[in-house]
Image (cartoon, rainbow, N blue to C red):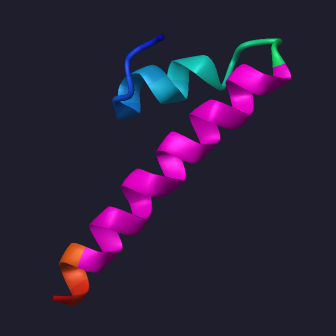
């Protein structure tokens, strides 16, 4: 399993593999929602 950090996710978006891209998008979306939640509190 690859790293689950933001920089790795952005790198994985360039992959030709669809599953890898979807996994990367999921990681990026999770991080963005966490940032939004911390800003709202």
Q: Is residue 33 magenta?
A: yes
> Is residue 36 rendered to the left or right of residue 16?
left
Q: Looking at this rendering, what residue extends furthest in the left direction? A: 41
For the C terminus, which image quadrant? bottom left
Left or right: 27, with 37 as reference point: right
Q: Quadrant of residue 2?
A: top left
Residue in the picture at 83% in, 24% down:
18
Q: Position of residue 30 (x, y in %)?
A: 45, 55
Q: Position of residue 10 (x, y in %)?
A: 52, 28
| Number of disc labels | 0
**Outermost residue to the front:** 1
User: Is 8 left, or right, of 39 in this rendering?
Assistant: right
Residue 28 to residue 15: above or below: below
Establish if 10 lies above or below 27: above
Q: Looking at this view, name the residue that lies furthest to the bottom.
A: 41
Q: Seen in the image, is 29 located left or right of residue 7? A: right
The x and y percentages for residue 5 are 34, 29
Residue at the spot 29% in from the left edge and 65% down from the top edge:
35
* First to last magenta residue range: 18-37
Give the answer, above or below, for where 41 lies relative to 13. Answer: below
Q: Is residue 4 magenta?
A: no
Query: Which residue is nearer to you in this view: 10 or 2?
Result: 2
Tell me which residue sits at (33%, 75%) in the image.
36
Q: Residue at x 24, y 88 (%)?
A: 40
Q: Main secondary structure of the magenta part?
A: helix
Which quadrant holds residue 12? top right
Query: Which of 1 and 35 lies nearest the eye of the viewer?
Result: 1
């Amino acid at each position: 399993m690859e790293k689950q950090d933001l920089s790795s996710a952005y790198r994985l978006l360039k992959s030709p593999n669809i599953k890898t891209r979807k996994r990367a998008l999921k990681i990026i979306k999770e991080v963005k929602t966490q940032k939004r939640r911390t800003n709202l509190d």
